[in-house]
Amino acid sequence: MEPIIIVLIILVVLVFIALIKTIQVIPQASAAIVERFGRYTRTLNAGLNIVVPFIDSIRNRIDLREQVVPFPPQPVITQDNLVVNIDTVIYYQVTDARAATYEVASYIQAIEQLTVTTLRNIIGGMDLERTLTSREEINAALRGVLDEATGKWGIRVNRVELKAIEPPTSIQDSMEKQMRADRDKRAAILQAEGVRQSEILRAEGEKQSAILRAEGEAKAAALKAEGEAQAIRTVFESIHAGDPDQKLLSYQYLQMLPKIAEGDANKLWIVPSEIGDALKGLSGAIGNFGPLGGGPSAPAATERREQPPID
């Protein structure tokens, strides 16, 4: 009985192993290459798959998702014989699992070497300045060459990026000095432009201020002259309306004499010639009124003074 039990146990184990090898579960976005006696049979897609146990074998499992591979810095010589180190990043995706397995031994290594050689060809036709300023052009050219070459490997290169372009240390120092000089130059130009604009604005302000001040002074002088003319006109009209005679004018003239003589600085007083006419007019006016005692008696008194004394 014991040999029969052992045989049964062995058969159960073989059946269990056969079931495991028969049922193959492939994850999503993955593929598996099946070989039968060392020859490619088919490609297993995502999901549950059945294979012949002990006859079919899984050669390779490939991830169909987009992959990102950074490559280490590569020294590249430019057209002007300068060595620059360039870091590249490749975004690729496997589109044909069979070709990626059988058309190339290691597609990652093949893409890396193809990137280096293509990059050297592209950079070799550019000088340093163009290399530093033409990343988009280099990326497009590199992607075109890689996509064409990797198509037969079942690889699609979606994007190529230059992560860093490092020129030699001496060139970096020279570039930093040049950039610093350019910044200082731009700063000096902007400062000079600012000073120039400030001076222009200040001059314009002073000009406008002078114009407004002159216009104000002119208007003030005109208003003052107009006021004085109006005052003179008013006084003249008042005097003309009052119809003053020579006697009143002479009296007013005499009233103004003390005001003319006021002040300590008046050391010399010049009497105008018109004062004689004024005094004559004033004396004539006083003579007509007579002494303070009343008019007709004055000539009589004069006549009495003229009579000679009686002996």
Image: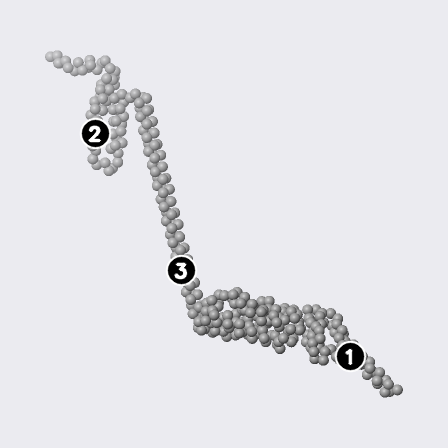
Residue type at the position of mark 1:
Ile
Q: Which residue is mark 2?
A: 272
Q: CA distance from mark 3 to mark 2?
A: 75 Å
- The answer to whether residue 48 is left or right of residue 111 is right
Residue type at the position of mark 3:
Ala
Position of the N terminus, as image quadrant, is bottom right
Q: Position of residue 23 (x, y in %)?
A: 76, 74
Q: CA distance from mark 1 to mark 2?
A: 153 Å
Q: Secondary structure at mark 1?
A: helix
Give residue 180's quadrant in the image: bottom left
Q: Which mark is residue 17?
A: 1
Q: Which mark is residue 188?
A: 3
Mark in front: 1 vs 2: 1
Q: Earlier in the sequence, mark 3 or mark 2?
A: 3
Position of the C terminus, as image quadrant, is top left
Q: Few, some or many C-alpha atoms within 10 Å of disc 1 (few <14, some 14-19, many ≥20)?
A: few
Q: Is residue 294 above or below residue 36?
A: above
Comparing 172 with 279, the one in front is: 172
Q: Earlier in the sequence, mark 3 or mark 1?
A: 1
